[in-house]
Image (spheres, rainbow, N blue to C red):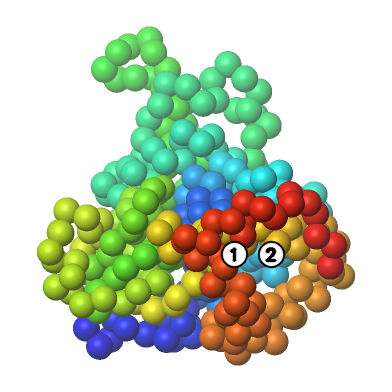
Amino acid sequence: MAELLMSLEKAVRRLVHDGDTIAIGGFTINRKPYALVREIVRQGKKNLYIEGSGSGGGETDLLIGAGCVKLIVNAYLANAAFGKIGRRFRRAIERGEIEFEDYSSDIQPLRFHAAALGLPFISVPHLLMGSDLEAQWGIPTEKYKEDPKLPPAKFLIRENPFNLGEKLVYLPTPKIDTGLIHVQKAAPDGTVRIEGPTFLDVDLAMAARFLIVSCEELVDPDELRREPWQNQIPGLIPDALVHLPYGAHPTQCTNYYDYDPEFLYLYDAVSRDDTLFVRFLDEYVYSLADHRAYIKKIGFELLKKLKVGEKNYVNNLPRRNVRP
């Protein structure tokens, strides 16, 4: 139990390594493990492979912009209403700085669920067939064969052995070295409770070889045992547990706080420009020793306004672009 509880710095240093395949929980601007991601950037991890769990947001865009990412497999990446596409993500692809593979928003959940079940691949009757995506889509075939972190092919088209004459697309399931999720409550024994939408976090947790969980509240195990049907992840799954209140800021965390619209607008503005983005990294990541310093910089008064019950603050803010 004592070994499971770790500092932010220790959890990332121990379980995230250069060249690892990582998967990040949450959904666009919902319950993203930003504190864990900022620590990965702070520690200068490199050549990461990202398996997008459905819809990535600014946290993945941040990793790409900071030069931590070599390759990403994803279905969607944006900060919802605060940016139609991750700008660092788009810029890196345009410049040829990262490799990118695109799956649909229905295929990625299927791949993650199959990985959680220990299945090596899935077969689907749609996706590529009947379009030029088979030839034009994603990472070149030769790179799949050259990279040991990738399967030998991105897909195979084969006959359905149980319905002869029908063609199926066979897709490999993701092989995740380390998963990152942020949750509302966790106990020191590793039991996890997610309040509100779980997105793909449970499948991600089950599929990953290692799992880092950050939480808003660290609670007594007896509190979670009173309603065991509310707990999604058993204590034997997490490999590191980090107590990080506001660890999802600037995204929202159901029943705890709303997203921070001004910060998300700010990120959209600075991520458009290389120089501004570098300054942003210096100000909000590299110059801050840890998550406590980050929270102090954001300001407790602002964070208090974002808490559930203070809805007027977010609802009354104008929807505009904030210039740095």
Q: Residue at x 55, y 65 (%)?
A: 306
Amino acid identity at mark 1: Pro
Location of the N terminus (image quadrant) = bottom left
147 on left or right of 195: right
Q: Residue at x 75, y 80 (%)?
A: 282
Residue designated by label 1: 250
Q: Residue at x 14, y 73 (%)?
A: 222
- Disc marking residue 102: none
Q: Earlier in the sequence, mark 1 or mark 2?
A: 1
Residue 106 picture location, percent across and down: 46, 33
Q: Secondary structure at mark 2?
A: helix
155 on left or right of 219: right
Asked if 195 appears above or below 296 in the picture, the reply is above
Q: Secondary structure at mark 1?
A: loop
Count residues near mark 1 (Cα–Cα under 10 Å), then give few for <14, some for 14-19, many for 20+: many
Residue 230 picture location, percent across and down: 22, 55
Residue designated by label 2: 263
Location of the C terminus (image quadrant) = bottom right
Count residues near mark 2 (Cα–Cα under 10 Å), then give few for <14, some for 14-19, many for 20+: some
Q: Residue at x 13, y 66 (%)?
A: 225
Measured Cα–Cα span from mark 1 to mark 2: 7 Å
167 on left or right of 271: left
Residue 208 picture location, percent across and down: 36, 60
Amino acid identity at mark 2: Phe
Asked if 294 appears above or below 233 in the picture, the reply is below
Tell me where residue 137 sits by quadrant: top right
- Asked whether the viewer can see residue 71, the reply is no
Q: Are marks 1 and 2 in contact (CB under 8 Å)?
A: yes
Q: Nearer the viewer, residue 6 or 111?
A: 6
